[in-house]
Image (cartoon, grey):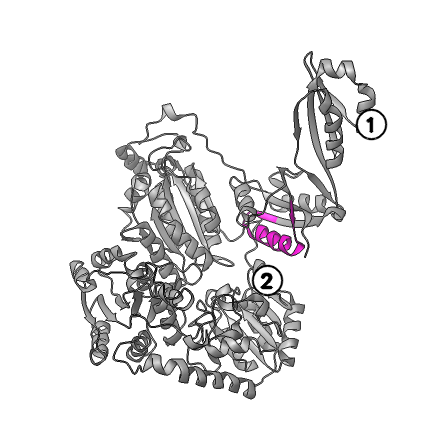
Amino acid sequence: MEKKEFTITVFTENQIGLLNRIAIIFSRRKINVESLNTSPTEVESVHRFTIVISETEDVVKKLCRQIEKQVEVLKAYYNNGDEIVWQELALYKVSTDAIAEKVKVERLLRENGARVVAIRKDYTVFETTGQREETDGLLKVLEPYGLIEFVRSARVAIIKGSSDFHERLKEFEYQEPGEDVIENEFLDKNEEVFAM
Amino acid sequence: MQTLTLQQRRQTKKNTTTKSGSLAVLDALVAEEVTTVFGYPGGAIMPIYDALYDYSDKLKHILTRHEQGSIHAAQGYARTSGNTGVVFATSGPGATNLVTGLADAMIDSTPVVCITGQVFAQLLGTDAFQETDIINITTPVTKWNYQITDATEIPSVLAKAFYIAKSGRPGPVLIDITKNAQLQEFEYAGYKKCNHIRSYRPTPIVRKEYVEAAAKLINEAQRPFVIFGQGVILGKAEKEFKAFIEKAGIPAAWTIMGMSAIPTDHPLGVGMLGMHGNYGPNLLTNQCDVLIAVGMRFDDRVTGRLDKYAKQAKVIHLDIDPAEIDKNVKTTIPVWGDCKETLPMLTKLVENKTHTQWLQKFADCATKEKEKVIAQELSPVSEILSMGEVIELVNELTKGEAVIVTDVGQHQMVACRYAKFNQSKSNITSGGLGTMGFALPAAIGAKYGAPQRTVVAVIGDGGFQMTLQELGTIMQFDIDIKILILNNQFLGMVRQWQELFHQRRYSFTDITSPDFVQLARAYRIEGKTVSKRENLKAALNTMLNHKGSYLLEVMVGKENNVFPMVPQGKGVAEIVLSKDEI
């Protein structure tokens, strides 16, 4: 079987340490995670991981079963590129002078579907959202004008075949509310407490 | 957070309804019907040990000589009793010493709850004295782990810990409790057992259509073959399993972990699978037409080369863990679920059959193995003792009623090949991880888990020296264990491989041992060494009839090999019966 790019979507509890539990499923097998996004879902206490890896479907299927086996994982899905709609967000910081002098900014924004998110005397920050070739496209355009900094987010993806995810998540939360995460509250109290 | 003095805490205990985190821990154990804890104290777990001082009527604490000993003992306890083993250890080195045992319990699906002390919450991440990040260290080797920094979490987290360790496919759980949380007084609302976690499905829903499809396949089969693992024991489904194979008349072979789920002399029991398993079960795996795997995980030591494994057969796989289906061997029909539930469903649908000709093939293989291997092993021509004849005598003298705990290596393979068992939960060994040093501490736990039974720990001269400090535990708590050291003066299994595959280049497998009998005597354990056949039976008899622990060292052949063998990288049908065939 051929290695292909797969996007793994995981719904989980919001729990400290779970990121590591999921990450080591890949690292244990020496699989490189190309992109990983984790964020709260629309439902309180449920988090969503979007993980991109290149592997054979057989391996990806097994990985998903191992992920789902974790106590705090609600569900794991995997999809190939045709089964999802996905986007990445990119930010570009360039010198305001260079850009104002040499570039037709309006055209650049229009052609690359970009927005300006900050303008300062010394720098300007552009933003674009799209797939890799689109974010790379703007990078190529801006590079000659003295790119100062560039950052790209992890992929987020919507599964085409997810007909009732939202409803199911809402219903689930309604029936079985999640638990709060309890964090360490004592880290800055070292001097107030006697300890040995 | 409030840190109170010991006196203040005792005062609080008397006057109010609040409780310290430490007491909440012990109350949780009592509520979970824990009677025995294996552990070792240290700085970060002292509040729990302080509370334990007043709990000695409810909780027995066994002080081992090393934390690895604690967790192996807890494993042994879990395996003979069917209950969850409990371990206490301190932070830092105390906690890291548990790692081998956690990995062992993880791969062999043993329910264990470890409670480790941790530095004060405000010191986390400061490289404090005896601080290690035990949560992240143990993440890959625990089914679940959690750090408590606030005592209010203790009741609910411990309830979850016990539920997770025992339910579904069991496994080890580690709960790390910072010292401030152990000391903290909090409003205690009582302990409630956990029986549901919304993101956790311990037992998959049984799909009836798959059970039906499996039954159809079994009914049509000419040469069906059952292979079973520890799932049958963990699922407490020994009866259901027996009913199934007996109705369908299917020969059944066990994995090392499944051994003793049915009596070893059951007419349909055809022996052990695996690299040093029996000839027939390995060879005929590649001749069956339907392979029915029950509660086993197709370990590479069972399958040999996967591309030469049962390619002709349709595979039915019954397992509680969906991640096991198709993991190593492609399944024709997956039957996920608890085998306690799925086996009776299957039994109802399968036809009453006998497969006389097919069974005869196993019998023929057994005859061949007997001639070529077993005869020499059990009645050697040479004067030098073999491991097999020792085990055979143990069978005779214990009548198959003993718990046999084995370490790892040649003696383990020989013991598992030749031991006879009449009842379940009798073969305690480190199967998946192959942890040398497992047997002595595991035997301690095994005895607490099954106090009425004779526990024989069969150990090699190498493995014994890895955890022999537990003789101190045996001495202090007056534990009755029969320690049987099979001494071949080598790290035998590695030596065997060096002989067979590395041109007899015996690189560092020649191991010198102390005088084991004198050593035992230093721990006030009686013992004896035997090297002559005429003295062996009497010596074993003395050991078994001795009141209390006894150590018997048997000097066996230095360069004996374990056969049959499926050489690494070969298929199961390429099993060899002797050195000449390699």
Q: Where is residue B555 in the image (x, y as percent from the top left)?
A: 24, 71
Chain ID, mark 2: B
Q: Which of B249 and B136 is in front in this view?
A: B136
**Amino acid found under the numbered disc labelled 2:** Ile
Q: Is residue B184 magenta?
A: no
User: Taking A132 as reference, is B378 above or below it?
Assistant: below
**Amino acid found under the numbered disc labelled 1:** Glu
User: Taking A95 as reference, is B204 above or below it?
Assistant: below
Q: Which of B368 and B541 is in front in this view?
A: B368
Q: Is residue B119 visible?
A: yes
Which range is magenta?
A: A53-74
User: Disc 1, disc 2: CB below 8 Å?
Assistant: no
Res A111 label: 1
Going 71% across and 41% down the picture, which residue do you hit?
A: A157
User: Taking B209 as reference, is B367 above or below it?
Assistant: below
Q: Position of residue A12 (x, y in %)?
A: 60, 44
Chain ID, mark 1: A
Secondary structure found at label 1: helix
Which quadrant holds residue B343? bottom right
Q: Is residue A69 magenta?
A: yes
Packing grade of label 1 (10 A; few <14, some 14-19, many >=20) is few
